[in-house]
Image: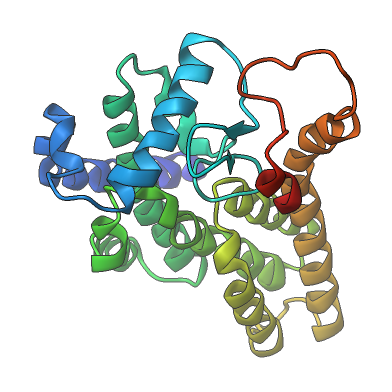
Amino acid sequence: RGWAVELAKDAACVAVLAAILAVLVRQALVTPAHILGAQASEATLVTYPSFSYLHYRVHDLHEVPLWNPYLCGGTPFLGATTAPVFSPANVALLADDPLQAYTLAGALLVWLAGVFMYAFLRAVQLGRHAALTGGAWYMLSAYVIGHLSDPTFLAGPVFLPLVIASFALAFQRASWAWTGTAALAWGLTALAGGLHADACAIGALVILAFTFAPIGGAALGTRLAMLVVGLGVGTALAGAQLLPAFAVLENAANPSPYQAGNHLSNPTLTSLL
């Protein structure tokens, strides 16, 4: 019964973060056109057009596109940050309007940034009020809230607190179960398009493994083993998204026509994969 009460208190803090964000971005949620603005930007020229095409293929045609053949001579969707197909934020694709879905996806990632920072601060033994303050501050930081209109840059900042929190709990409790959670979080970072943040994250996690030595926790050798296993499994989970692309490449010499939008005849895309 005690754990249920504690879980309810944490859920209330998560709800507070959602309420704060909803109040601050209510105009964008009500009128999605405000999210892009009138000026030309990477969001208006690249990110939103890619997301709009992804919305069309997934929402309207119920297909998973490997790439967008209509942008920049062919832009890959798998293993890329432009329009990550398997990002958890893509639950927003359920919305009928692509701009509304784009706005919801950005808001969801910003909210998750606050939630995962709250989880990280709780994992390092901060109280709820301190963790809630830190989560809200992180969620509303200039980088995170500033990329609400271009959420492809948010994958790293969103999921890395969860990755570090999971590894911290694994080290603290000598728990391989938490190592598995860390592996899943690491995979989600890449699936959501956070590949550019991985190098910095690995450095931070190595430092954490050497410096985080709680009483009764895992020994240094065990911490390093947990780090290798967690990152290795997570990378394999994320790398699985490339398998369909490789399967298509193997059939590239097949004279039969490919489904529109999934052919890989573009040499630029082929070289990228």
Q: Is residue 87 above or below residue 187?
A: above
Examine the rendering and report whether any part of residue 78 can be seen: yes
Residue 245 pos. (x, y %)? 77, 36
Q: Is residue 272 left or right of residue 16?
A: right
Q: Is residue 179 above or below residue 85?
A: below
- Residue name at image x 25 percent, y 56 percent: 145
Q: Residue furthest bottom?
A: 211
Q: Residue furthest top?
A: 61
Examine the rendering and report whether any part of residue 13 can be seen: no
Count of numbered marks: 0
- Residue name at image x 33 percent, y 61 percent: 128
Q: Is residue 100 above or below residue 243?
A: above
Dividing the picture into quadrants, the one containing residue 94 is top left
- Residue name at image x 46 percent, y 58 percent: 119
Which is more toward the observer, 273 or 28? Answer: 273
Q: Is residue 266 left or right of residue 98?
A: right
Q: Is residue 151 left or right of residue 17?
A: right
Which is more toward the observer, 41 or 154? Answer: 41
Q: How is the image coloured?
A: rainbow
Residue 80 pos. (x, y %)? 59, 49
Residue 241 pos. (x, y %)? 73, 39
- Residue name at image x 63 percent, y 17 percent: 260
Which is more toward the observer, 14 or 21? Answer: 21
Dividing the picture into quadrants, the one containing residue 113 is bottom left
Residue 242 pos. (x, y %)? 76, 42
Q: Is residue 270 above or below residue 251?
A: below
